[in-house]
Image (tube, rainbow, N blue to C red):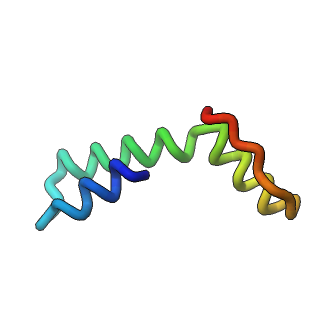
Amino acid sequence: MKEELRLLAGARSITPELFERIQGLRRVVYDSRDYQEGLNAIRDKRKPQFKGQ
């Protein structure tokens, strides 16, 4: 997410290549086990147990 924000902060207009790079970074995050753990923790009303995966 930090990389995505850095790319967006430095962009004046988003090129198709930059858009695809950002989408790729998002896919990595949204497909991660930690992201799913965060969603499950919110749903279960508990603290998440992130493992860096």
**Looking at the rendering, in which quadrant would you find the C terminus?**
top right
- Pinpoint residue 3: horizontal percent, then vertical percent: 34, 48
Look at the picture and state if 23 lies above or below 14: above
Nearest the camera: 16 or 22? 22
Camera-nearest residue between 3 and 14? 3
Location of residue 49 with respect to 46 vertically, above or below: above
Q: Is residue 41 left or right of residue 30?
A: right
Q: Residue 21 falls in which quadrant of the image?
A: top left
- Is 31 placed left or right of 6 in the picture? right
Q: Residue at x 28, y 55 (%)?
A: 6
The mark total stands at 0
Which of the 4 quarters of the picture holds residue 11? Answer: bottom left
- Residue in the picture at 82% in, 61% down: 43
For the point 37% across and 41% down, the residue is 24
- Residue 25 placement (x, y as % from top left): 39, 43
Position of residue 28 measured from the top left corner of the image (x, y, whole percent): 48, 39
What residue appears at the point 78 percent right and 62 percent down from the top-left corner?
42
Q: Say whether residue 50 is left or right of residue 43.
A: left
Q: Position of residue 46 (x, y in %)?
A: 86, 58
